[in-house]
Amino acid sequence: MEATVIAVGDELLIGKTVNENATYLSRRLAALGIATRRQIVVGDRDDDVAAALEEARALAPLAITTGGLGPTADDRTLAAAAKHLGLELVLHQPTLKEIERRFARRGMKMPEVNVGQARVPAGSRVLGNPLGTAPGIIIEEAGWVLCLLPGVPAEMEYIFEHGLVPYLEKKGYVGERVYEKQLHATGLPESAVAERLAEVALPAGVHLAYLPQTAQVNLRLWGAAPDEETFRERARPVLEAVRRGLGEHIFGEDGATLEQVVGEMLRARGETLALAESCTGGLIAKRVTDVAGASAWFLGGVVSYANEAKENFLGVAESTLAAHGAVSEETAREMALGARTRFGATYALAVTGVAGPSGGTAEKPVGTACFALAEEGATTSDRRNFGGGRDWVRRRASQHALDMLRRRLREKGGGR
Amino acid sequence: MEATVIAVGDELLIGKTVNENATYLSRRLAALGIATRRQIVVGDRDDDVAAALEEARALAPLAITTGGLGPTADDRTLAAAAKHLGLELVLHQPTLKEIERRFARRGMKMPEVNVGQARVPAGSRVLGNPLGTAPGIIIEEAGWVLCLLPGVPAEMEYIFEHGLVPYLEKKGYVGERVYEKQLHATGLPESAVAERLAEVALPAGVHLAYLPQTAQVNLRLWGAAPDEETFRERARPVLEAVRRGLGEHIFGEDGATLEQVVGEMLRARGETLALAESCTGGLIAKRVTDVAGASAWFLGGVVSYANEAKENFLGVAESTLAAHGAVSEETAREMALGARTRFGATYALAVTGVAGPSGGTAEKPVGTACFALAEEGATTSDRRNFGGGRDWVRRRASQHALDMLRRRLREKGGGR
């Protein structure tokens, strides 16, 4: 089963309103096994609404519109649809009574303009709207189903769930539902992920999508199935192949963030973390403390922006700074060692780098970052260059640092 | 001038992704005096992309697509557009070199799959993309202009602003522009802002919109005008009335963030800042170091999540913690004093609170936060409760702390 979603409203076309209604409708339709063939957004003009309806009719047996059912002159959807289909508008007494009751409850007389909202195309089905004055309307026309919904999100959602869904179920339009499984990878760009997974065979009914984020690629396996068990069964060989292909680059599943995964590993091991941040300026601490309950495993951090702070708070030697510079693996190692000792943590991560836009040199261009991880008896370090703007460099550096710890914990047997 | 906006991606049609790209493009086009005639969303299939292009061509002389330019097999826009228009794809050497350079900078060899991103339709114009591998492409075809942009928002926006806008200006497609002036207020909820501004009269051609954010209300004055000077002249009385109505609650203009404003005031005064954060967990430091050049006035901070960190790094007395608890004005004051002394900063801000979801008590419920500002010879403190979830509490607490400093600097004559 396929559908077209039409949103009507000038506010969408001038970019004042994000089209979250279309997202809602498409997501809910997908979950009901109804694929959205196309989304169309048109303005509050009869001809444009009619053109969208014409197009929708050619594309799919179901069309849903949202918006343009209000009482004012710029609400065009109902009139345009009736005109386009050659249907007369007739007064729907139960709706009129309901609208009058709504106004009466607020101690008001219904303005004349609202009478129009009780007029519906002859032969149509009315879906009640307890949250507002515009009802939903279903028009069946030679095998094509057109459903008109209001644009106010809460009203649209209510009528969709309580009016349209039961109708679609009764008509037998509801098909197999869509299930999904997500895996999250880091440390590889999207193209390298794709290359590693080029040979992964997708059985019928299982799709694989790549969703790149900064320093992270989300892999989404999805497909329609009669039930979740069947989907899992179908997806299992793909999941295994993806895991084999990406190995330790996969850090989590189903929406888990890297900081949540690291936190869970530390919590399970009863260990703690401290941070020493220079170029990331508190971003890693912020991410770590985004995790509710982080105080069980996170002791704290130092944002050592000035060199003096690196010396005073972390015990970085003046001679190290003089010999190697603030952005060096040597400084990163001393930062990590200092943070670990002074916070009394099991592990400390340190980052120092050049986030830009200025401060780069030929030897250490903008985007250079040095990392260190200190633990009992061992400190490891490395250096990377992340090209790009300040936010990008900081975000990637924070991801790399957290991933350094995750890999180490994984080696030690702390989880995945 | 009119345009059609086409977004390509299965993620949009299954409702996994909100179509914010279309909103961005339509808003920016409107600001350039170009009306969006229709937005269309199609999936990653050649025929559907081709159908959307066909439709767009009939509707308006300009079409912009976003999405489907990636390196993987499910990226269909470029191939579909070339096929639809009967154009051959040819290798664009400068783009190939640029992609190779991107990988080389990370010490990697370019995967073969990325070569496809350097193929462009014969005779097209390439718009550089310093943020990713997919360039923008402009195809002129018998009076119709088609521009292909990637779907990653930052890349799309960059190419739109730096590649497409100059092209449209040169072609004379840019009409009467929409100008705007923004004012940013903090410390008042939206309803209080609206109440204070209820009497503000709006002259013809000037509109006023309220855009609430967390702990901030942005006021946007906008309108179409032949030139900026005319708009400014029209908007001046409104601006003055808004300033009178909101007074010191207005902290900045035209997109300035609170951290930028505070940084600018400190820079102008040659003064410095240190931080001591508990519940905000590095968020204030992160915001402060979002500002490029922050190292001129930001010395660093301590994220003292554990009580021991408050004692060891900030010198908070064990007796203070025992008598008043970690979340108290007394502890906040000692944190600020300790940070100020140990970093050697002009000012230090401290925050300690209960971000939740757990950890609240009857006396100090979730959302309670205590603040202190230490400076030469004086330390001030206060306590607030911000109801709401963890992110909300942290964001509001970070805003309140920065605003404490801004108000103090304003008193001392550091700027607005």
Image: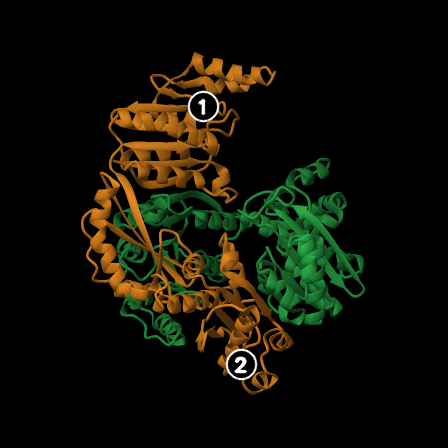
Chain colours: A orange, B green
Q: Position of residue B148 (x, y in %)?
A: 38, 56
| Residue A9 versus residue B234 in the image, above or below | above
- The amino acid pointed to by label 1 is Asn
Q: Which residue is mark 2?
A: A361
Both on one chain, marks 2 and 1? yes
Give the mark, 2 or 1, whose residue is nearer the N terminus.
1
Name the residue nearer the viewer: B238 or A175: A175
Q: Quadrant of residue A91?
A: top left
Nearer the observer, A405 or B415: A405
Q: Position of residue A52 (x, y in %)?
A: 36, 35
Q: Is residue B304 shown left or right of residue B149?
A: right
Image quadrant assignment for residue A243: bottom left
Where residue A73 appears, as percent x and y from the top left, is: 52, 27
> Label 1 neighbourhood size at 10 Å, few (<14), some (14-19), many (20+)?
many
The amino acid type, in three-letter code, at marker 2 is Thr
Left or right? Give the position of B378 relative to A8.
Answer: right
The kind of secondary structure element at disc 1 is: loop
Quadrant where the image shows the C terminus of chain B: bottom right
* Residue linked to disc 1: A129
